[in-house]
Image: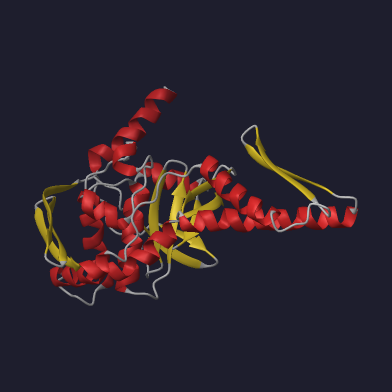
Amino acid sequence: MKRRFILLILLLPMMNVAAAKQTQFAYTQAQGTHDFSYQWRVNDRTFQLDFSIPNEQFNTMPATRPAFSNDIMQRHVQVALLKMAQEYDVKEARINIFRRSGTLQYTVKSTDEAMAQKTLDALQNKANVAKQQYLDEQFYTPYVSPMNEQAVKHDHAKYAQQSTAGLKTVIDAIKEMQVNPADSREFIAISLSWLQSIPYDTLENRISSNGAGFVSPKDLLQQNKGDCDSKATLLAALLRAYSSSVRQKMVLLPKHALLAVAVRPKPNDKVVTENGIEYVLLEAAGPGYFDIGEVADSTLMGIRNRQFILETM
């Protein structure tokens, strides 16, 4: 009986949730612009969104970086340490830098114990700086997963921040679709249904995504497909372009990601709370259609069980 109950819960969202279905997509490069055209349906309503992004703005948006490689990062750190070691007089300290069992290691030999310790500390500091430099350049960041595991993930906030400038014309196009261009909830609702209609794809093929499931907002627009954290990042960039003062959080569950934004919640809106501030949940993944403050039962269960972390966007 327990197995039947679990199966029923998993099937219910599919039975009750409408779909945001894309019916048309076109992307062309004209002289000086990148031109996009989207058409999609939610229930009986059809939406049309057209915009052009000038080359100079489109080129400011970061492309997807290659999949994270700990081996490449260690080589980057090793090169930095080898350059540093060349600055030391071998008569004072002999530095040995090597890789063993998949880890980067280094030793210092010196007749002066204080000198040896000082050199080790300097090497450790240099290694930390070089590691962070590599992560920054590749748009990655360390974090602790909801299961309390040390990990490295895409820096969603950095992708969103550096994509904002290229989305100004998109903001204007969405506002033209609104009945009331001053209504922020209407803007968010249209943006949500648009992103939900874009085909969902984990993009695990190395050819199409450099080996990573995530794609940047720029590549998501061009490829017309993306997974949950890719769509949530594009939504975050859109909302930053819409209002730089809006406070946002990426909600990271073990197998899902969505956005949350600090707007005044309505009575039935699902929210997460941090430091006394309520953030309304925004489900951009699709293809199921979820309005502002609506999420799948499985997502809500994970949030209620505190199986998530929040990332400031």
Q: Nearer the viewer, residue 138 or 14?
A: 138
| Residue 98 rendering spot, x and y as whole percentages | 67, 40
| Residue 104 rendering spot, x and y as whole percentages | 65, 42
Using residue 130 as the reference point, say whether residue 277 is left or right of it: left
| Residue 59 vertical position relative to residue 38 in the rendered view, above or below | below
- Identified at 33% across, 64% down, the residue is 163
Would you identify the image quadrant in which residue 50 lies? bottom left
| Residue 32 vertical position relative to residue 297 in the rendered view, above or below | below
| Residue 231 rendering spot, x and y as whole percentages | 31, 53
- Identified at 49% across, 61% down, the residue is 273
Q: Nearer the viewer, residue 185 or 198?
A: 198
Quadrant the C terminus occupies: bottom left
- Identified at 45% across, 65% down, the residue is 278
Using residue 111 as the reference point, say whether residue 307 is left or right of it: left
Report the label total: 0
Q: Nearer the viewer, residue 77 or 42?
A: 77
Q: How is the image coloured?
A: secondary structure
Using residue 190 as the reference point, say whether residue 114 is left or right of it: right
Would you identify the image quadrant in which residue 205 lies? top left
The answer to whether residue 40 is visible is: yes
| Residue 16 rendering spot, x and y as whole percentages | 24, 42
Quadrant the N terminus occupies: top left
